[in-house]
Every structure is written in structure tokens, then in C-alpha cells.
Amino acid sequence: MPTSDHPPSRREPGPLVGADWLAARLADPALVVFDASVGAHRAAARRIPGARPFDLDGDLSDHAAAAPHTMPGAAGFTEALRSLGLDDTDTVVVYDGAGVYSSARAWWMLRAMGFDRAAVLDGGLPAWTAAGLPVEDGGPRYEGARGSFTARPRPGLLIDAEEVAATLADPAAAVLDARTRERFEGTAPEPRPGLRGGHMPGAVSLPFGELQRPDGLMRPAPELRAAFEAAAGGRERLRFSCGSGVTACVLALGADLAGYRDLAVYDGSWSEWGLPSPLRPVATGPAPAPVAAPAPAPAAGSAEDDRPDLQPL
């Protein structure tokens, strides 16, 4: 049975739990399971029993914002989670149909809104089904009572372009980009029209798939630490970007598991920075690599450009 290499504490489940951990607690009425799948995986006709929809393409993004997947305000987030029956005293496990892809975004959003009793299912639905655990027909749904959840925003966990620019100028900090190296270097086109190719000058490429094993589980903490030390050159203040603020959260999850604590996600990510603007410079080609221990070899088939079932985020 696939399981996680990151055992949870006894008091809280996060930030990562294995399929066996979730299966043993699935009947707990104080446990809420959210399906945060996006794209084709959201339309899949199966779910972990009782899973509720954490819709990053719907109510759980601010559609009035220019960039996709922008974090909604506290009032909108509170309303969306109450409509899904979440109480402040509940425990949450979030998964997605691709593995560990968009689920980390839901985990980071909950954390940014002051909710810490949340974990990502290691390996997502593929790990659950590989373990022979049950699924229900139909997509995630919820028709129960409203919850009592109240958002309590934590400033600094989601940051804007100005804060990213300040980070790029700070020698004690690093901006890590979760997109594929080809998109980072500008040799592959951006999937969203109107965006420039390349990366922020001073940013470092760390594709989110390199934090995962070939079976889709997150790498063990020592390997994650080595990957971040190789990318960040020993810097402990880490900021993460991607295409639209979703897979950047996989880096945030990996960094948390590796023991880093000063972390933030650029909410607008390349969907904002990549727009034509003289205020936001763009570089192409490889970024200079800091001198550090080599990172673990990339997991085969884990980058989004190698998997047609993943939409580039």
C-alpha cells in the first residue's frame, strides 16, 4: 500500500498524509475531505467517498481579478467554505486527481486564511486507488448543512508583484519558479495568450515535478532539503511563483516538509508578471545556478509538459 514518507504528528495531520492515514479516519465526522482537482481531472466521474468540491476554477478564485486563480477576499472565502460545511474545529485533507498538483494550492489557501488543521493527501487520488481503497461514482459534491468556518487572514503568505520585486533585490532571499525549465528559459511558449516568455531576472528554476518521486509521492524530507539548498544556494527566505499561483504551492509544501519556515507564494505569478510592462523585466535562457549540493534527479514523467492530462498552471 503506498504511504507517505512524512508521518503526521498526533495532534495535527499536516502538511502531508498518506492514503492509509486517511482511510483509517474517513468515517470521522470531524474530518472533511476536499477534492481540489482542476481541468480534466475535475470532470472525472469518481471521488474519494464523501469528498467535497474545493473549486479553484469556480468559487474559490476571485474572478474579478485580472490573473486566474487569484485568492478571494476573506468574506468570499468564508462564504465558500461555510457553504461546503466546514467548521472551525474540523480537520481537512485535500487531494486532487493528478497526484500532488492543485491540492497544495487549497492547503496553502487554508493556511493563509488562518486554518492550520489541513493536510495534502500524498500522491492524491492515484495513490488512493493504487492502494485499492474505495471510490464513489460522480464528481465531488456537498448538500449538507452550512459550516461555521471564519477566515482569519495571515498577511505575508500570499504576496504581490511589488513584494516579489523587493525579494529579487534581497541577497538573503530567493524566488523559485515552479514552471518547466523550458517555460522558465523562454524556449517553450506560455499557454496563456499575451504573456512574454522567460522569467524574472534573479529567479531560479525549480520545476514542481522535481519534488516528486516517479510514483507521484513527495520525495522524503532530506531529498527535498537537498533540492531547495541546490536551488536557493542556502537562502532560507523563499518565495514561490509559477503560471497562476497553483503549482507554486507544491514548492511551498515541499519547502515546509524540508523544514523551511519563511515562505510565501506570489499570487499573480507569471499570469501577472509576464504581461507586457516596463515595470516588470523579463529574462530568457538559464538562470545562473548557485553553488550547492546537487538536487535529486527529476522524477520521470512528473513535469506538466510531459503529462498531457495536466493543464499548465
Image: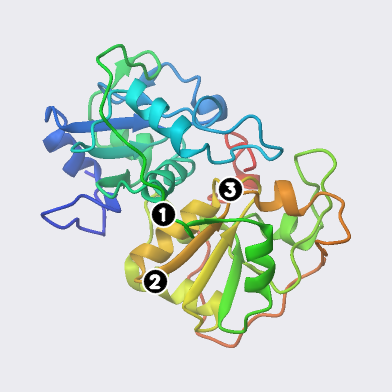
Q: Which residue sits at x=17%, y=35%? A: 23
Residue to which mark 2 is pinned: 260
Residue to which mark 1 is pinned: 154
Residue at mark 2 to residue at mark 1: CA–CA distance: 18 Å
Residue 139 in the image: state x and y as whole percent.
Answer: 40, 17
Residue at mark 3 to residue at mark 1: CA–CA distance: 17 Å
Residue 310 in the image: state x and y as whole percent.
Answer: 58, 37
Q: Type of residue at label 1? A: Arg
99 relative position to 30: left or right: right
Residue 97 in view here: no
If the image is split into quadrants, where does the N terminus sit? Answer: top left
Q: Quadrant of residue 177?
A: bottom right
Residue to which mark 3 is pinned: 245
Q: Type of residue at label 2? A: Tyr
CB within 8 Å, label 3 to label 2: no
Residue 275 in the image: state x and y as whole percent.
Answer: 81, 49
Taking depth in this image into account, of 65 and 171 the one nearest to the observer is 65
Q: Is residue 80 above or below residue 15?
A: above
Q: Is residue 256 above or below residue 245?
A: below
Name the mark nearer the viewer: 3 or 1. 1
If the image is split into quadrants, where does the C terminus sit? Answer: top right
Q: Which residue sits at x=62%, y=84%? A: 171
Q: Type of residue at label 3? A: Gly
Q: Which residue sits at x=28%, y=19%? A: 146
Q: Residues within 10 Å of mark 3 (few under 14, many from 20)?
A: many
